Structures are given as C-alpha cells and as structure tokens.
Amino acid sequence: MGNKPTEQFAWYDNMRQTSPVRYDSETEVWEFFRYQDVFKALMTPAVFSSDIHQNRTANQEDKLSRLLGMTLLFQDGESHRTLRKITQPDFQPRFIDSRESIIVDVVDELLDRLQEKKPMDLVRDFAFPLPVKVISRWLGINEGDEKLFHDWMTELFGVPLNTLRTRENSKEQEQAIARRNRVVFDMQQYFSSYFFYYRNHRDASVISHMVNSAALDEEGLLAYTLLLFIAGHITTTRLLSSTLLLLSERDHDRWQIKQEESWGSKFLEETLRYWSPVQLVVREIREVVQMDNIEIQPGSHVVLWLGSANRDPAQFVSPDTFNVNRDFSGVLAFGIGNHYCLGAPLARREATIGLTHFLRRYPEYQVQDYVFPDRKRLIFFGPSELNAVML
Ligand code: HEM
C-alpha cells in the first residue's frame, strides 16, 4: 500500500499552534493557517486582492500565468463581476438540472468501459476522464481528445514551477516556462477553431455563450476557456479519487450509502473538508495589515491554507476525525466570498452522480494500492493513482 501524505496535516497543526501567521523566506510569501484568518482574508477583498499578477515582473514570459491573470479568478471589483456574469448562468443548479443527462451519459459510458480494464487505475479510467469529458461537453468541444488533454495537463502542471517568485528565473524555471508556452500555443490553436465555429453556430454550450458576449476579445476568450477547462477538472478528479479511496477503507459508510444514497452526498462533503482538493489560494495585500503584532506590507503575497482552515479545531470538532455526520457549514473547500467557486454546483453534481452510479455497479470494489503526487506540500490534494479490483 502507498503512503498518505498526512504529514501535511500534522504540519498545519503545528503551524496553527506555533506560527499561525508566518513568512516563508524560501518562497517569499506570508502564510495564514487559522480558520478565522483565512476566512477574514477571503471576505475582505479590498485588502486581500485576487489580482496577484499585477505587480510582478518575473515570469512575464509565462503565457499561462499571463492569460490566467486576465481571468475572473485573478480580478477584483467591477472587472471580476463583469467576467463572472458571462458564464454564471452556465453553472447554476437549474441549468445543470436541464443538462444533467450529459453527466449521467458520461458516467455510464465510463462505467461500461471499466469492466474491460485490467489492471485498473480508478484515477486514469474514471476520476480523470469523468470531469474532463463533462467540462468538454459543457464547453462544447470534442471530448474524444482526452489523451491530448491529459498530455497538456501533465506538461502544464507536472513541473513544480514556482509562479510566485520575484527573483530572477532559474534555468530550470526558464525551461519549464518554455515547455508550458508550447502547450499554451497548441491549446490556442485548438480552441481558436471552436471560437470560429461557434460564431456561426449558437447552442447551449459555454463557448457559444462566451463568443457571443461583447465583453470578451479573442485573448479574453482563450483565457476564460483555459480557466474553465483547467479549473473544471483537476479539482473534481481529486475529489472523486479521494472519495473512492476513503470510502474503500470505510465499510460502514459503504453500507450506509447502499441503504440511503443521501449518505453519499454527506460523504462527499466530508471528503471536501478532510482532504480539500484545493489546499490553498493566494492573495496580494493592498494596505498594511497588522496581525499577532506582525506588520505585513502592501504588495506582499499571502498563501491562505484552506486545507489548514478546514482542520482547525477552533472551527470544527475533532477535525482530524472523518465524520460524515458533522455540521459542514463553514467548510472553505470551495472558498468563500465573491470568488466562491463558480463550478461548485457542477462539481458536486458530477461527484454525486459519479459516486452513486459507481457504487450501484461496483459495490464491492477494493483499492489494492494507491499513489499520491510526490511533493512536499500538495496544492491539489488527492491520489494520482488508485489500483483497484472490481469484485
Ligand atoms: C471539487 C471540485 C472543485 C474545487 C474543490 C474547487 C475549488 C475552488 C476554489 C477554492 C475557488 C476559489 C478561488 C479563490 O478564492 O481564489 C474556486 C474558484 C473557481 N472555480 Fe472551482 N473548484 C472545483 C470545481 C470547479 C469546476 C467543476 C469548475 C467549472 C468550470 C470550477 C470553476 C471555478 C472558477 C471559474 C473559479 C473562479 C471564481 C471567481 O473567481 O469568481 N471549479 N474553485
């Protein structure tokens, strides 16, 4: 059996007790670990700005950072609101209801194919392709290009690139940026043909809505599409793979879900808290901040550890215990405030349908081995490989 990187949670625990507000000289960022501090920062966007790319000169050549910097995720105020409004209707629960068959079809197609897979990796064969195919159909692109998407994502996120550094880029970073730029170029070519197509063919897909919005030029379209494509699957893959691993070790919960499917939704909520798929978000400080007799200067970057906030005993009773019956209010897995995850209703629906259909078909699955990404601190938490047998 593999090892779970639980030392990350032990580290949070230690930091919350010894230095809940600290400066990391290696990455040159501040870090917040307590629930109350993370919450307050997320709820005070005028001081804790999402526009973290504005004042940085390093990594200018990194096209992905530049493009993502243009998206709603990294904008404040009016420009954030304008961008968010463009696709908000595409991710509302009512719209998801009307297109739920997309998710059901994708899940069932994948489950049909699982039988033939031996040996089977539930990440490669289920947790990864599910959200990729769903977000592709939501966007209106050909989900058959899944292998291509997988290669792109591995190239873009397979390198430990520190996009926060302000120092001179190292040779290694420069090479990584050059590789990422090549992928971004390929993605640009790929998506441009869809932008062209949807200018003349309106339908219910997100790209169709976006190309017909006056607020986006060609570069804005590409940036938005990349954000939705990336945000729409890495995170949900992690949620699904974590859920399948945690559930495989909890016979009681597995039995409960068989009795009442709503137990599955609670299991997902607890997974979101316990192994938050996104462990951190970053903000840039706009005015002097005083905390614990520490003064933080404007222009500083702060890592807000959502994964630590979600394990803070000041907020959650026995936070290191996986408890499906706890009160989930206040969990920060999807953030909070004006940048609250746009895709949360879609992610929850995909994960719920994925889990319930999976269990109906393979109630006795067993995980035999698993692998977590080999990093000191995981930003996207969850297993990257789940070797299983379907009994
Ligand atoms: C389990 C799955 C997911 C998790 C844990 C997750 C987590 C998050 C978090 C923590 C944020 C807040 C970022 C911040 O405050 O800076 C966020 C924002 C966002 N997410 Fe998700 N996400 C998930 C799935 C999705 C999906 C399926 C989509 C769909 C396309 C999506 C699209 C977005 C977008 C567009 C934003 C930016 C919202 C804004 O800035 O107003 N996410 N997500």
Image: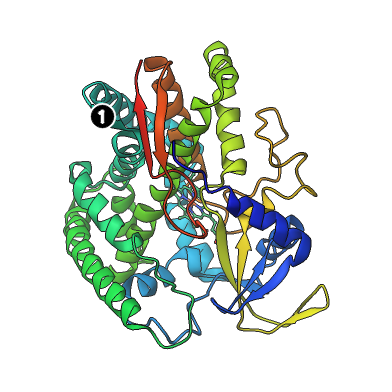
Query: Please, which residue is most extreme toward the front here?
Result: 1
What percent of the width, then of the height, locates residue 120?
29, 30
Q: Does residue 51 sit above or below 388 in this rendering? A: below
| Residue depicted at x 26% and y 46% | 140
| Lateral position of residue 316 relative to residue 236, left or right | right
Which quadrant of the rendered structure holds the N terminus? top left
Question: Of the residues shown, which amino acid type is indicated by label 1?
Answer: Pro
* Side of 18 relative to 131 (left or right): right
Describe the colour scheme in one phrase: rainbow
Query: Outermost residue, right direction?
Result: 293
Q: List the residue tagged with mark 1.
A: 119
- Return the residue nearer the eye: 158 or 220: 158
- Where is residue 212 shown, x and y percent of the image? 30, 58
Residue at 58 percent across and 21 percent down: it is: 253
User: Count of labels shown?
Assistant: 1
Tell me which residue sits at (39%, 30%) in the image: 100
> Where, by quadrant of the figure, is residue 320 drawn?
top right
Label 1 CB less than 8 angstroms from ligand 1: no
Residue beneath the point at 20% across and 47% down: 147
Instruction: Give the answer, above or below, for where 145 lies relative to 44.
Output: above
Residue 324 versus residue 134: which sits nearer the camera? 324
Q: Position of residue 34 (x, y in %)?
A: 73, 59
Evaluate whether residue 335 shows in this view: no
Residue 143 showing in the rendered view: yes
Up the image or down, 248 lies above or below 123; here it is above
Q: Position of residue 382 (x, y in %)?
A: 47, 45
Give the answer, above or below, for where 157 lies relative to 311. Answer: below
- Is residue 13 found left or right of 375 in the rendered image? right
Q: Secondary structure at mark 1?
A: loop
Residue 35 location, quadrant: bottom right
